């Protein structure tokens, strides 16, 4: 279909990807597709049940669009791996997150696990993944990127990112590299506020931009914008998503990117609270965005579509700008989207795809990423001696921190090697009462392993007090293992032994248990700096 075949409303609809709140097409998404002609849908965990349900929902959405004589839909998702995975089901592979892959130092692992993910997404009717994250995480206090990044070395991030992009696109799923020009060196979560990166252009080119330059060279289909202010590029205090200097001047003109630009969700506070969703959509299109993402609220979604339409009708946005954006979108749809009914069914694919090789690969990646940072004679644990395990449980879900429903704790994993394991589960933000209970119980143990879990920018105060209290007890063996943020060591530098796992998913807990008991060696290398604490190694 040509741009000239579409009405203005149909063209503008192609520039939107929207979400809804059900496990089958509901009135919200029906309205958006039929009345507002939106060209894409985004899934979250609220949309996900059994694989068969996801595949059927994808098919129903495509049929809905086809019956209206509309173009095939983008069906997108944030399936990054690790702690950001919208599909949480035992029959869908739990691929590791980016920092775990970065710790392996092996881009081939990244390609292979991304290929697994791409094939599974494709079988479920999902044709765009908002991944990989190409942010260079060089700020230990970054609350929103962290382990979503491959690490702090721009060359390493570029290499792993390129491998992921190739894997997704070679298996029929458009990759969306994010968050341009780089969200790694921020200390504000753009879901909650407006962040700024103050570096000059020379530094930006050497660090933040390098992975995106590589992605452009390698033909990435889509680049997602960052709701972050870059004063070196944009003189006004507006985030990159709304900046013509960033999206057109830098990304299009200087870096030569000819693919599709998609915004991060405009309902995030960095946009919604400072500019409004409707005005944000207009500013994003004026800046050079081809697709606007509005993920949650019908009122905001309609406001955004109608605001862009009104801006074109008033002459604020030339229709030629819309035509150029829609041309890029249609070109990519023609390249990537298969006609309905040509792909293998999800149940058939997943049954065939559940192979021992996949499980072996994921275990190999876990073992190859877990990193021993320091060990003052604490390892291995003695298997004939009781051990106390302290396990922080994630009890609240955010956009970038999602617990798995089928979790495996470290205590459960250690029980496969040590007969007498007592595991105490605490909150990830324990209060003083919880801390005192654990310390009282620990007095009877000579071996203690405490897992830490940091979802934000620093180890929660309760976990810090707990580790400090355990150190003061001086058990014969005390091991601290971070199960998300590797920077936890900065809060408890006196820990006699410290390992990084980068995530608390089952393969990683099983790998950690084998390392703690001396049945395996930690194979990972730190992909970020922990300062002077990185002195001991295995």
Image: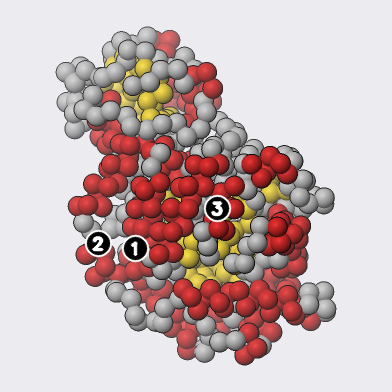
Residues tagged 1 and 2 counted as in contact (Cβ below 8 A): yes
> Looking at the picture, how far across and down is residue 23, in whole percent?
42, 68
Please identify the quadrant where the C terminus is shown: top left
Is 5 situated above or below 315?
below
> Residue at label 1?
120
> Residue at label 3?
214
Residue drawn at point x = 19 percent, y = 25 percent: 418
Q: Which of label 2 and label 3 is nearer to you?
A: 3
Say which of 200 and 307 sits in front.
200
> Residue at label 2?
353
Quarter where residue 37 is shown: bottom right
Q: Distance between the residues labelled 1 and 2?
A: 8 Å
Can residue 278 be seen here? The reply is: no
> Looking at the picture, how far across and down is residue 96, in whole percent?
38, 46
Q: Earlier in the sequence, mark 1 or mark 2?
A: 1
Residue drawn at point x = 47 percent, y = 89 percent: 67
* SS of the residue under disc 1: helix
The local crowd at label 3, few if under 14, some if 14 to 19, many if 20 or more residues have their Cα within 10 Å, is: some
Residues tagged 2 and 3 counted as in contact (Cβ below 8 A): no
Say which of 41 and 363 sits in front.
363
The local crowd at label 1, few if under 14, some if 14 to 19, many if 20 or more residues have their Cα within 10 Å, is: many
């Amino acid at each position: 279909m040509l741009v000239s075949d579409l009405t203005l409303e149909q063209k503008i609809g192609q520039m939107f990807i929207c979400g809804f709140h059900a496990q089958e097409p509901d009135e919200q998404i029906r309205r958006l597709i039929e009345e507002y002609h939106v060209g894409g849908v985004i899934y979250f965990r609220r949309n996900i049940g059994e694989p068969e349900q996801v595949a059927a929902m994808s098919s129903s959405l495509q049929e809905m669009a086809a019956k209206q004589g509309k173009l095939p839909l983008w069906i997108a998702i944030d399936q990054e791996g690790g702690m950001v995975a919208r599909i949480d089901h035992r029959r869908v592979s739990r691929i590791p997150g980016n920092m775990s892959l970065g710790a392996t130092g092996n881009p081939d692992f990244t390609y292979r696990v991304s290929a697994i993910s791409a094939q599974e997404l494709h079988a479920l009717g999902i044709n765009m993944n908002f991944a990989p994250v190409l942010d260079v995480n060089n700020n230990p206090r970054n609350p929103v990127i962290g382990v979503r990044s491959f690490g702090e070395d721009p060359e390493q991030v570029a290499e792993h990112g390129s491998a992921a992009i190739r894997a997704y696109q070679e298996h029929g799923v458009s990759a969306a590299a994010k968050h341009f020009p780089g969200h790694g060196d921020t200390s504000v979560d753009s879901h909650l506020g407006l962040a700024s990166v103050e570096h000059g252009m020379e530094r930006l080119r050497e660090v933040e931009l390098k992975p995106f330059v590589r992605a452009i060279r390698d033909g990435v289909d889509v680049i997602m914008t960052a709701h972050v202010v870059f004063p070196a590029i944009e003189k006004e205090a507006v985030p990159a998503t709304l900046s013509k200097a960033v999206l057109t001047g830098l990304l299009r003109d200087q870096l030569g990117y000819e693919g599709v630009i998609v915004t991060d969700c405009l309902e995030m506070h960095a946009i919604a609270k400072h500019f409004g969703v409707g005005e944000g959509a207009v500013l994003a299109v004026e800046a050079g965005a081809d697709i606007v993402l509005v993920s949650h609220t019908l009122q905001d979604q309609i406001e955004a579509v109608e605001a862009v339409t009104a801006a074109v009708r008033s002459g604020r946005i030339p229709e030629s700008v819309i035509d150029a954006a829609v041309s890029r979108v249609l070109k990519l749809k023609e390249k990537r989207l298969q006609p309905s009914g040509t792909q293998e069914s999800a149940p058939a694919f997943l049954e065939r795809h559940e192979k021992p090789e996949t499980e072996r690969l994921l275990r190999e990646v876990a073992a190859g990423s877990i990193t021993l940072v320091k060990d003052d004679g604490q390892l291995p644990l003695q298997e004939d001696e009781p051990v106390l395990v302290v396990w922080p449980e994630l009890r609240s879900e955010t956009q970038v921190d999602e617990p798995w429903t089928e979790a495996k704790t470290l205590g459960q994993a250690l029980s496969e090697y040590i007969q007498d394991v007592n595991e105490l589960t605490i909150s990830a933000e324990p209060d003083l009462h919880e801390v005192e209970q654990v310390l009282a119980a620990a007095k009877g143990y000579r071996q203690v392993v405490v897992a830490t879990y940091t979802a934000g920018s620093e180890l929660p105060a309760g976990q810090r007090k707990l580790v400090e209290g355990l150190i003061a007890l001086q058990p014969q063996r005390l091991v601290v293992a971070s199960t998300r943020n590797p920077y936890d060591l900065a809060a408890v530098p006196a820990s006699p032994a410290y390992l990084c796992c980068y995530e608390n998913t089952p393969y990683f807990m099983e790998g950690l248990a084998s390392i703690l008991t001396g049945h395996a060696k930690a194979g990972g290398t730190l992909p970020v700096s922990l300062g002077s604490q990185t002195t001991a190694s295995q």
